[in-house]
Amino acid sequence: MPHSTSTAATPMKPFSRSLQWDLDAAVDDDDGKQHSADDGDGKQNTERGLRRPSRLFYLALLYTVFWALVFYHHFSTSVQQSGSAAVAAPTVLQLKPSAFFSASRFFRRDPCAGRYVYMYDLPPRFNADLVSGCRRVSASSDVCKDVSHDGFGPPITGGGEGGSLPEQGAYDTDQFMLSIIFHARMRRYECLTADPAAAAVVYIPFYAGLDAAMHLGNNDLAVRDALSRDLLDWLARRPEWRAMGGRDHLLVSGRGTWDFLRSPDSTGWGNTLMTYDLAIRNATFLTTEASTRHGNDFAVPFPSHFHPSSDAEVTGWQDRMRRLDRALLWCFAGWPRPRGNGMGPERAEIIEQCGKSSRCSLLGKLNHYVPGHAMRLLESAQFCMQPRGDGYTRKSTFDSILAGCIPVFFHPISAYLQYTWHLPRDHRSYSVFIPHGDVIERNASIEEVLSRIPPEKVAQMRERVIQLIPTVLYRHPAAQGVTFKDAFDVALDRVVDRVAKRRRAAAEGREYVDGVDGADSWKYDLLEDGQTKVGPHEFDQYL
């Protein structure tokens, strides 16, 4: 039976009344009886043994440690800041409630986690000197006009001729200025880092397109290849390159891949940027027209004429495109090519059919290209023809999307196998495909094909095109507070994702493969997440 003794030691006073209640309750067993630390003979009760601290004790301990760390962090930060601000003044600790209770201070996730970019500070011969030497590109000064305003070219005020362009954010942008435009955005990228070890991607701000344009016609191959080889030698000496062998590097060429694929032992077109040293193939190349036979180049939209600075400018333009009265069924903004040329017959047939129709209009070759004239035509039609040009792709494709005009393609390489990061996989949702062979052989009337599309389907397609506008334009680099993702954002997200997969694979001792060189290279770009194998495709017959 429990008893007390006059010789028992006075119990230690607990540090918390609530803890004392908990400790008192702990001596009650399940049947409500109490047990002392001794049994009736003054011996230790072996059934209970030593009591373990209660759960509440641990909670109180964690609570105390947490707030001790909070106070330590705040005080140490305040001391450092006060000491650096005024050496002679005594340190004063100022307690602010926000310092302790702001969730963002302690629990906010780093918005740049996994998105940091390290940008090389290249010697100016690789970028700035190319801009200042713009007159070397051609005998005229047009290129010097094009490189102005961070590659956007001269501003177009008042909506341009005919008011067919936005009142704000419109520029006379050349299609080959993407490397400069991309660099301007990257300089203001919110997640730049000076620590290459923390970077998800390493960016190479080389103006490859400008360099190529200066020397494409030069018969001296050593001169044509000189700067590209200089860059590769410079990269090979960098520890950032050696860390992953260039697999985390990004380069924006500003022109089509074909301008950089000449074999070192060949005298053909272009330079050897992508072939001189096979190690460069580890990097990710962004081009305006990718090769369907190589696995490391990815096409991004040509720059059009609208570079907005706010969400309101974009939504305002989209609403304007929705309200337009489009009097024409179809149109073509372009001019003929020699019929003997591989792409000439296609254009010739389009021009001939359009010229015979009262529901089509043409914008032929002018003394000089005027953006307002072209945009006014594209905005007046429901469908805009996009045949092949100098290559398979055209800047006009993105001009037509900006104009809310449904593009009509005649070869899958013109868009469907190119801009897989920016355009929907379901090409029927936003465009029309008429095989070029049908047109050339006059087996298909373009107007009949377009007339058979139900009006409700046309309305759905046009709305999808208008929704695509933000993702295919390049916003102004100084814009702040925008919420939409433009072509730069979409491309960089995909590059970051690609490098992350390569990095994880390397950590596991394997190589991440998301593309191959060869006839099936283009099929890898069309794989959905989780797919690893390619097979027969509806476009096989065109390649």
Image (cartoon, rainbow, N blue to C red):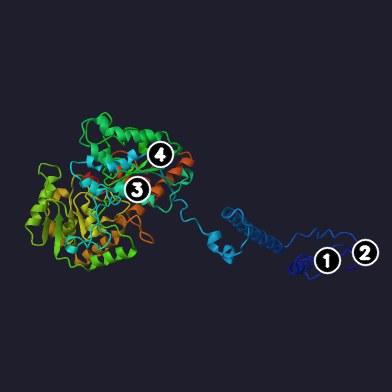
Q: Nearer the viewer, residue 113 or 19?
A: 113
Q: Residues at badges 4 and 3 in contact (C-beta under 8 Å)?
A: no
Q: Position of residue 176 (x, y in %)?
A: 25, 47
The amino acid on which the numbered mark 4 sits, given as a three-letter code, is: Gly
N-term-proximal mark, 4 vs 2: 2
Helix, strand or loop under label 3: helix
N-term-proximal mark, 2 vs 1: 2
The amino acid on which the numbered mark 3 sits, given as a three-letter code, is: His
CA gap between label 4 and label 2 equals: 80 Å
Picture disc at residue 35 = 1
**Residue designated by label 2:** 7
Q: Nearer the viewer, residue 516 or 175?
A: 175
Q: Position of residue 489 (x, y in %)?
A: 36, 54
Residue at 46% in and 38% down:
243
Residue 519 visible here: no
The amino acid on which the numbered mark 2 sits, given as a three-letter code, is: Thr
N-term-proximal mark, 2 vs 3: 2
Helix, strand or loop under label 2: loop
Position of 120 compared to 54: left or right? left
CA gap between label 4 and label 3 equals: 19 Å
- For the N terminus, the quadrant is bottom right
**Residue designated by label 4:** 246
